[in-house]
Structure formats: C-alpha cells, structure tokens
Image (tube, rainbow, N blue to C red):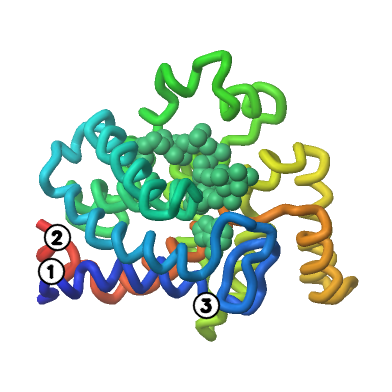
C-alpha cells in the first residue's frame, strides 16, 4: 500500500528522471539549458515539486468528464506559469498525466485504462481545437500532425510498449524522438525543418553522424525536443506501474 507521500513521489520520480538524460537535443538537463533562455534545471525542480502534489487534486473533480479535467488542466498550467515566471516547463505533461490518472481511476486494469485514455482523448478535439485561429488546428490542416493529442489517441502506444533491457533513458529519448510528432520543433522551425530533424535522428541511430554533430545541429537551429521529454516521463511511469498498478490505483482512490 502506498501512502499519499509515496503517490506524490511516484509522479515526481517520472518528472525528475526525464531530466537525468545526458543527451539534450536542445532540452534542459543538469548540464545545459539547451535552446532555452527562459528556464534551467532549477525552474523544472520548482515546477515539478508543485505539480506532483497538484496532480492528486484529480480526485476532487469529476474525472469521468473531460471538461472538468480540462478546467483543472488550465488551472494547473496557470499556476505552473506563475511559479516559473512564465516559462512553459510542463504544459504537455499536465495534459498527459491528467488523462492517464483519470483513466486509471476509472478502470480496473492497466490495459482497460488505455482504452479509456483513447476515449477521453477524443474530447480534446473540441471547439477550442477546431477554432480556425488555433495554431494546432492550422498545423493539423496543413501537415496532418496531431502532436500531444495524437499520442493520447494512441494511448501512448510507443512509450508503453518500449522495452529496453537496460534502463537507458538516453536510448529511450532518442527512440522517442525518432518516433514522435514533436510539435515543439514544428512550432519553432516549421514542418520541413521538423522532417530534417527526424532524418538527423535516424542518421545518428544508424551511426552515420556523431552525437556532437546532432547536439550542435539542435542548438544551432534553436530547437528543443520538449514533447519527447514528456514521452520519456510516460515511459518511466508505465515501467513503474506494470509492477505497482494495483497498489497505485488503490491509494489513488
Ligand atoms: C491539448 C493540449 C496538449 C494543447 O496543446 P496545444 O494545441 O496548445 O499545443 P501542442 O503543440 O499540441 O502541444 C502542447 C504541448 O504538448 C507537448 N508535446 C508536443 N508534441 C508532443 C508529442 N509528440 N508527444 C507528447 N507531447 C508533446 C509539448 O509540451 C512539452 O514541451 C513544452 C516546452 O515547449 P517549448 O517549445 O520549449 O516552450 P513553449 O513555451 O511552448 O515555446 P517557446 O516560446 O519556448 O518557443 C513543455 O511544456 C513540455 O511539456 C507542447 O508544448 C493541452 O495543453 C491542453 O488542452 N491544455 C488545456 C488544459 C488541459 O490540460 N486539458 C486536458 C486535460 S486532460
Ligand atoms: N527537460 C525538458 N526540457 C525542455 N522541455 C521540456 N519539457 C518537458 N521536459 C523538458
């Protein structure tokens, strides 16, 4: 049985550990701020310390209802921005973990909870998304890229099934960058550039370019694979939950 403190730690553990990567690709880790001028590792510490406790507020709302989740999500985003002086450290993470936790609360097994994620994720295509001025909708119309919403629609298939024998977060990060539609890169540099980023990742995985070259490519072009960091935390979460699901659900209730 987990105590409340341990539940907080489980989420905190996932948010903390994605930061422990040696490979940055423009993101923040203990040795670099990557392509970010508005945040460093300490900004992440403050934000995740607050958020890991705040996620437990999910029990106070009607978590069967997407609009209640969205309302809590927006409140959490605003509080996060207050804590970080306006830097977006965990917007994606708030969305993902609210969906995942709501689904776990509603279902009786990890597998069933994944069907629930798919169900809830469909509601994120709401009137705010289909607003012609919404940049995510415009991006979807132009390039068919769904980003964070798309990963949720697939119930985080790739990080869920990613089976690395060693707990190698750098390897996980690279594979997740190779797989994901990271909209942070599109937002900063456009779709064509995003495709060339993906090509560079596969070239590195095939041993055709060095890590130094890849890291410099991201810095020089001012990109950051922040969406893939979110997926690393989800990978860690599912790895933990496979062995602790029953306990986690019981104390979450
Ligand atoms: C539904 C939302 C996700 C809304 O998303 P929105 O349409 O506003 O934007 P998206 O571009 O779709 O992405 C939002 C965040 O999702 C992360 N992300 C992107 N791609 C992926 C992916 N393939 N897989 C997983 N996650 C992904 C990403 O968040 C991370 O990056 C952030 C840092 O980005 P960065 O570029 O450095 O910072 P910015 O300030 O954005 O840009 P600069 O000014 O620096 O250039 C960091 O937060 C990471 O977590 C995207 O940012 C959802 O947000 C939403 O609906 N919110 C409302 C409330 C809510 O939570 N509702 C649902 C509750 S269940
Ligand atoms: N370590 C990180 N650096 C930049 N953006 C992120 N989003 C989530 N984790 C991140």
Image quarter (top left, top right, bottom left or bottom right) of the N terminus:
bottom left
Q: 3 and 87: which one is in front?
A: 87
Residue 154 located left or right of residue 100: right
- Which label number is shown at residue 19? none
In the structure shown, which secondary structural element does the residue marked by tag 2 occupy?
helix
Residue 96 in the image, given as x and y percentages of width and height: 39, 49
Q: Is residue 64 left or right of residue 31?
A: left
Q: Residue at 71% of width from left, 24% of height from top?
A: 142
> Residue 72: x, y in percent?
25, 39
Q: Residue furthest bottom?
A: 166
**Of the two numbered discs 2 and 3 in the rendering, the one whose residue sits closer to the viewer:** 3
Which of the two labelled residues, at mark 2 and mark 3, occupies the earlier sequence position?
3
> Residue at image x 61%, y 76%?
170
Give the quarter the ligand 2 occupies.
bottom right
The mark lying in front, picked from 2 and 1, is: 1
Q: Position of residue 91 (x, y in %)?
A: 44, 47
162, 97: nearer the viewer: 97
- Binning the other alpha carbons within 10 Å of mark 1 as few (below 14), some (14 to 19) or many (20 upward) gives few
Q: In the figure, 241 relative to 218: above or below?
A: below
Q: Is residue 25 left or right of residue 217?
A: left
Residue 103 versus residue 51 in the image, above or below: above
**In whole angstroms, how far apart are the C-alphas of marks 2 and 3?**
27 Å
Give the residue pinned by disc 3. 20
* Residue 252, numbered label: 2
Residue identified by numbered label 1:
4
Residue at 48%, 64% (x, y): give it.
161
Observer able to see residue 158: no
Crowding near the residue tagged with mark 2, few <14, some 14–19, many ≥20 C-alpha atoms within 10 Å? some
Mark 1: is the Cβ under 8 angstroms from ligand 1? no
Q: Residue at x 47, y 46 (%)?
A: 86
Q: Do the numbered discs 2 and 1 sit on residues whose CB atoms are within 8 Å?
A: no
């Amino acid at each position: 049985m987990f105590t409340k403190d341990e539940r907080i730690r489980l989420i905190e553990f996932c948010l903390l550990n994605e930061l422990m990567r040696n490979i940055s690709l423009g993101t923040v880790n203990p040795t670099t701020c990557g392509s970010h001028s508005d945040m460093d590792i300490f900004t992440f510490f403050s934000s995740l310390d607050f958020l890991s406790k705040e996620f437990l507020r999910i029990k106070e709302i009607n978590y069967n209802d997407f609009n209640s989740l969205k309302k809590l999500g927006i409140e959490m985003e605003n509080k996060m921005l207050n804590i970080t002086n306006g830097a977006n450290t965990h917007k994606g993470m708030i969305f993902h973990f609210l969906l995942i936790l709501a689904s776990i609360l509603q279902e009786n097994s990890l597998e069933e909870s994944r069907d629930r994620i798919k169900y809830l994720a469909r509601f994120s295509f709401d009137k705010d998304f289909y607003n012609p001025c919404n940049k995510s909708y415009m991006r979807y119309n132009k390039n068919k890229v769904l980003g964070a919403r798309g990963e949720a629609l697939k119930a985080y298939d790739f990080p869920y099934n990613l089976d690395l024998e060693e707990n190698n977060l750098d390897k996980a990060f690279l594979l997740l960058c190779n797989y994901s539609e990271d909209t942070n890169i599109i937002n900063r540099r456009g779709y064509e550039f995003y495709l060339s980023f993906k090509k560079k990742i596969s070239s590195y995985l095939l041993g055709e370019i060095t890590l130094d070259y890849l890291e410099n490519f991201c810095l020089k072009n001012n990109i950051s694979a922040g969406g893939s960091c979110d997926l690393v935390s989800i990978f860690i979460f599912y790895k933990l939950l496979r062995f602790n699901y029953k306990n986690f659900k019981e104390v979450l209730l």
